[in-house]
Image (cartoon, rainbow, N blue to C red):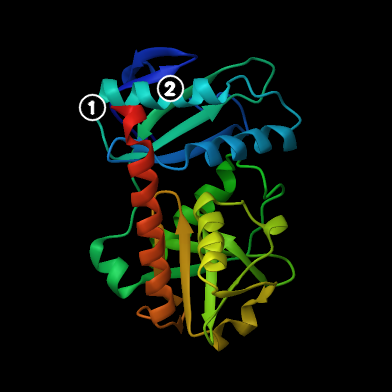
Amino acid sequence: MADWIGKYCIINDCLKPVKDITEDISFSKSPVYEVLRVEDGVPLFLEDHFLRLQNSFLLCQKKLIVSLSDFRKAVAMLITKNKIAEGPVKFIFRTDNISGFIAYFMTPHRPSPEEYKSGINTVTLYEERNNPNAKIWNTELRETATTLIGKNKAYEAILINKNRFITEGSRSNIFFIKNNTVYTTPEDQVLPGITRKNVLEICLANKIKTEIINISYSQISDFESAFLTGTSRKVVPIRNIDNIHFDSKNKLMRKIMKYFDNLEAEYIKQHKQYYE
């Protein structure tokens, strides 16, 4: 299903009309991809996204064909030519024997303002990624999660592995809170999200206690609150996982949300001059 917006995309370093994107956009069975978010004309945490892209290629034993400078120029061109100052940008790279990539503004998938206040509904899905640290498109997993989300009128599917541990969302990372301590899954079991990284750094900088542990599904009712993190959605309170309910107004969680907004604002302030 087409998810691109705007008038222009980039195909192999060349600016093209989005109508030139064909249904074989994924190029290969399991493309490497990266999504970053533009806010106020600035691509947020671009350097971190590029490092994760490099790591995905290393894990796939493939060679990345773009430099950090190329990555930055492509995003800047999409912002300028589409005259879009806010929204997610997706890069999709071939992983077969032919080098190539596509970049475009994509339809945002963010909670509503009300969901940021009251929290989102989520459901569980017994699935795990084969190579969780690499951002590789998994059509089967995405389709399964989308179907489950639609059937249950949920916002996200929370993945549970074969050991019945909570790992991450189908397109997000997950955190829990209990007794003013923040808990999340070890990094080797999840996609290392950029927002996840920033939240952990926020906790460290503000002396918020964190625990990186395996979290059993049977234990989650013991937690007071839970939230998701992701590039497009930022920090999102969870109202429930299946029929287990959480406090979506938890003070520590709301403080972390505010800290993250401040971090974004500071990043924009420092980088705005490069995109004007």
Q: In this view, does 265 lie to the left or right of 73?
A: left
Q: Residues within 10 Å of mark 2 (few under 14, many from 20)?
A: many
Give how far across and how far down residue 134 sits, in percent.
66, 43
Q: Is residue 47 left or right of residue 219?
A: left
Residue 252: which quarter of the image? bottom left
**First in sequence: mark 1 or mark 2?**
2
Quadrant of the image for the C terminus?
A: top left
Label 1 secondary element: loop
Which residue position holds label 2? 74
Give how far across and how far down residue 191 sits, in percent.
62, 51
Residue 58: which quarter of the image? top right
Q: What residue type is labelled 2?
A: Ala
Quadrant of the image for the N terminus?
A: top left
Instruction: Evaluate whether residue 267 shows in this view.
Output: yes
Pick the residue in front: 234 or 141.
234
Q: Is residue 118 above or below residue 30?
A: below
Residue ID at (58%, 46%): 140
Residue ID at (61%, 40%): 52
Q: What residue type is labelled 1?
A: Lys
Q: In this view, does 161 lie above or below 106?
A: below
Residue ID at (76%, 30%): 61
Give how far across and how far down residue 217 sits, in percent.
62, 77
Give how far across and how far down residue 85 sits, in percent.
26, 35
CB contact under 8 Å: marks 1 and 2:
no
Residue ID at (44%, 49%): 231
**Number of numbered markers:** 2
Label 2 secondary element: helix
Which residue position holds label 1? 83
